[in-house]
Image (spheres, helix red, strand yellow):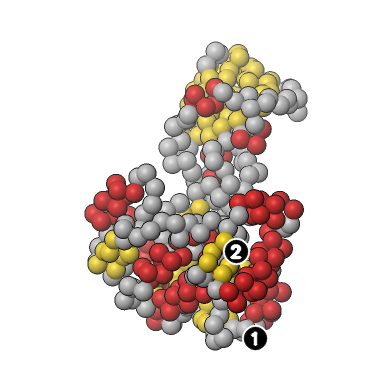
Amino acid sequence: TLADISDLFNEAHLKIRGAYARPCVDYAMKVLSGSVHCYQELQEEDWVDATLQMAREVRGRSVFLYFEDHRLVASRDELGRVLAEFDESKLDYLCYSFFRASQLDVRNLLPLWPVQQELFSQFYLSDANLALLGRIAPNYYTFSLLSVVSTEYLILALTTENRRRKLFSRTLTRIVTRFMRPHLSRRLFNHMNAFLSCFDAMVCLHHPASPFNLEKLWSESTLGGRKWRYAIPSIELYANYDDDNGVYEESLIKRGLYPFKANDFDVRFLGSQNGVTTRLLLDREECYDCTYYSHHARISRAPVVRIHVARGLIEVRYQGGCIGLGAGEGRFFYSNLRPVIYCLEQGEVELQVFDEAFGQQGLTAHRRTGGQ
């Protein structure tokens, strides 16, 4: 995904963590143009503090916060135009992914009196109209990591979050998030931190090593007592591979755009699972659509269907091709990539669907006969 945007920026600031950090840094240094700054020596226990040190080294007016699991779905030229107009319009914040899940669209901005432009609509966000924004889009994040943000606003957000004492209890987070809805649990932490700020301390919803404490719902906004220029894009720029953030068809998996390798399966894993199995009696020239999307908001493995011919002859239309299967033959397909059976010769087909939602305990389905 980095190669999609490798030459769009004058400077890049890198800090990569994890077992593959070194090869990732080497790759990034090779593909990125402009001035590349590496910060591998920075501590890894406090993401906000480390990122604040990096942000203070930025010379440009704005920053594109890069997430490797989001794919560019607009054209590179469209992204380049948005980035250029972001600075020309002196904007401070634009969320570039989770297009539907962001809860705020160019079509529901009217009460905020937006300035309408071709690539985005912009409006001022301040303490005065924050409550109105909350009425329009109760789940809108006024700061998300998936954003283009002015350097000034990014430093304000990081500085506000960078308390001297950061307290975190995994047990507390689990209890609160288990028994309270997400917006209520965040509100509770917000109230606790309003008190703890007197002691230059805060309690973190996520571990301080995680970047997600920086993300803020509208009710948690950090505005510093001034107005900031927000923008909502008119076109979708990025999409996540496997996470739809609770909005159906937000992710590439639920659009049938991923996996990219349509025949690359973990057969050993599938062999350890008990999928949902049924048998179909199909008439000649009958079609049967084997498309299936998992309901999970975050999918670790794309759902798979195994098509096995007990008798007869079929053709599976899949990813622009046709795959013939005769009696005794079977094959795996990603069900979200829309495989369709076309029956060439009357027969019987066994379908087995694998989805992490089913677990390892098999479920049953009813038999279907031809013509039903």
Along the viewing direction, whichever of 218 and 253 lies nearer the viewer:
218
Q: Quadrant of residue 154?
A: bottom left
Q: Are marks 1 and 2 in contact (CB under 8 Å)?
A: no
Residue 238 visible in rendering: no
For the question of whether residue 333 can be seen, the reply is yes
The correct choice, above or below, for 237 with respect to 157 in the image is above
Amino acid at circle 2: Val
Answer with the quarter of the image where residue 189 lies. bottom right
Residue 308, x across and y down, in percent: 57, 20
Residue occupying the point 65% across, 37% down:
357
- Residue 367 picture location, percent across and down: 74, 22
Residue 22, horizontal then vertical, whole percent? 30, 48
Q: Which residue is mark 2?
A: 203
Query: Is residue 227 positioned above or below 17 on the image?
Result: below
Label 1 residue SS: loop
Tell me residue 92's x, y (percent). 47, 78
Residue at figure coordinates x 41%, y 56% from the top left = 44
Residue sitting at 26 percent across and 51 percent down?
Answer: 26
Horizontal placement of 37 versus 185: left or right? left
Front residue of 166/239: it is 166
Q: Is residue 296 above or below residue 97?
A: above
| Residue behind mark 1 | 128
Name the front one of labels 1 and 2: 2
Among numbered discs 1 and 2, the one appearing first in the sequence: 1
Name the quadrant containing residue 245: bottom right
Tell me the element at label 2. strand
Identify which amino acid the numbered label 1 is placed on: Ala
